[in-house]
Amino acid sequence: MKQIKFNTLRCSALLLFAAFTLNISAQAQQQKIKPYSLNRNKVYYQRQPIIDADYRSFVDLGFGYAKDRYNVYYLGRILPYVDPMTFSLRVAMPTYPGDYPMDEDMYGPDDYYGYRITSNAVLFRGRKISDSPRSFKDLGWGYGKDNFNVYYMGQKMDDVFSTTFKVLEDGYAEDTFNTYYKGKKVK
């Protein structure tokens, strides 16, 4: 009887160990997958070939962006009117180190979908939102501003004073006359 219980315990422990080991190895393999790859003189985005991409000069920039000597790519698609010679990413830092918004409509530190500041434009989720990259600042919590406009999740906010605009926390922000929550005026 004791022998049967011992064998059952041993088999259970072995099965638990095997399941745990397989789960860890599957997670490690998923983390190593990169969206862009090079193979046989071609460039691929998530296993789909990118037509006319120059594999010799192709560079994966991270955050879904890549470039070669002819084009700049975002999520495998060519960004029109973006000069690859002057394009570079400046990764915005969070307002509070180690503290990131948790709502579904916010973005995290390694998300593809935040503000990306290039040498000649500001992009949000791959869409150009501002022509003032030198003055643009990612303020955190989904807010960003340049010298003239304030944005929430890539959308321009109306009637906001960018010179006095500041982000508080938890999606709240204010300028001289109003308070905002998630980009909308609080009444």
Image (cartoon, helix red, strand yellow):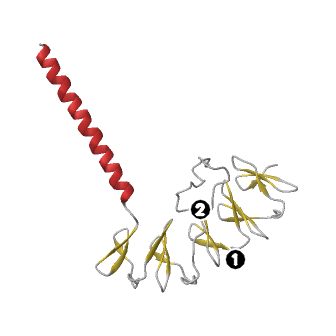
Horizontally, is 129 left or right of 24 in the view?
right
Q: Could you classify mark 1 by the number of other residues whose Cα lies within 10 Å: few (under 14), some (14-19), or many (20 or more)?
A: some
Location of residue 5 in the rendering, given as x and y in whole percent from the top left corner: 16, 18
Q: Amino acid at mark 1?
A: Asp
- Image quarter of residue 21: top left
Q: Residue at coordinates 17% horizontally, 23% vertically from top-left?
A: 8
Which residue ends up furthest to the right in the rendered image? Answer: 177
Local SS, label 1: loop
Local SS, label 2: loop
Q: Amino acid at mark 2?
A: Gly
Q: Nearer the viewer, residue 175 or 136?
A: 136
Horizontally, is 22 left or right of 101 in the view?
left
Q: Residue at coordinates 31% horizontally, 82% vertically from top-left?
A: 41
| Comes first in the chain, label 1 or label 2 | 2
- As drawn, the label of residue 131 is 1
C-alpha separation, residue under disc 1 versus residue under disc 2: 17 Å
Query: Which residue is denoted by mark 2 in the rendering?
Result: 114
Horizontally, is 33 left or right of 153 in the view?
left
Q: Nearer the viewer, residue 142 or 37?
A: 37
Q: Residue at coordinates 65% horizontally, 60% vertically from top-left?
A: 153
Q: Nearer the viewer, residue 116 or 174?
A: 116
Q: If the image is split into quadrants, where does the N terminus sit?
A: top left
